[in-house]
Amino acid sequence: MPNADDIIDRGKIALTHCWDSGGPGAGAGEEQVYRLGEHYAVASEMEAPLGPFQSLHEAIEQTDVLCITDASKSIDCGELSTGQIIDLLQVHYHEDEPSLDINGHRCVYDSRTGKYSQNAN
């Protein structure tokens, strides 16, 4: 089984979560999940590589790669639909109704339900 560094070095990006706090220095970045064969690893600008994981769901559930904060801007994933991603989000907000691009679709946060939904506009 490849280790996390090998998966990141030789694999392809399966998921990208982009964030931008608007602050200087380390105010923006990406969290990414890489896939090599049937193995996944998470690359973060804030942590050492994590993995290997046996599935994309396992990589998401065992890390903070889909931990959504005020700084989150977009998520792109060719392996999961927008709805599947919405169901996996860990939302931690301070604002009322932030929006987030998921797989190219504008999604809005509903504070009543505590979930995102795809914007109908």
Image (spheres, grey):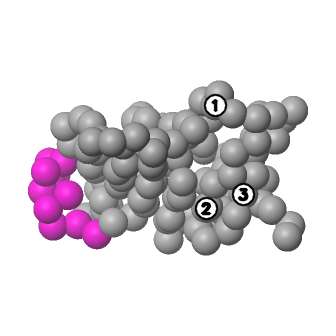
Separation (CA) of disc 3 from disc 1: 15 Å
Q: Element under label 2?
A: strand
Q: Is residue 11 magenta?
A: yes
In the image: residue 47, left or right of residue 76: left
21 sits left or right of 36 in the view: right
**Residue drawn where x is 53% and y is 47% of the image:** 72
Q: Secondary structure at mark 3?
A: strand
Query: Of callouts 2 and 1, which one flags the residue occurring earlier in the amino acid sequence?
Result: 1
Q: Amino acid at mark 3?
A: Cys
- Residue 94 quadrant: top right
Residue that carries the numbered disc 1 in the rendered image: 93
Q: Residue at x 76, y 42 (%)?
A: 97
Tell me the residue that label 3 is attached to. Answer: 107
Residue positioned most to the front: 24
Give x and y (percent) for residue 17. Answer: 45, 53
Displayed quadrant of residue 93: top right
Q: Which residues are magenta?
A: 1-12
Q: Horizontal placement of 28 versus 86: left or right?
A: left
From the top left corner, tell me how far across and down residue 1 is, in percent. 16, 52
Q: Amino acid at mark 2?
A: Ile
Q: Which residue is mark 2?
A: 102
Do tag 3 and tag 1 residues touch (Cβ < 8 Å)? Answer: no
SS type, badge 1: loop
- Image point (86%, 67%), residue name: 120
Label 2 vs label 1: CA separation? Answer: 17 Å
Residue 27 image position (x, y, % from top left): 36, 43
Mark 2 vs mark 1: give the one in front: 1
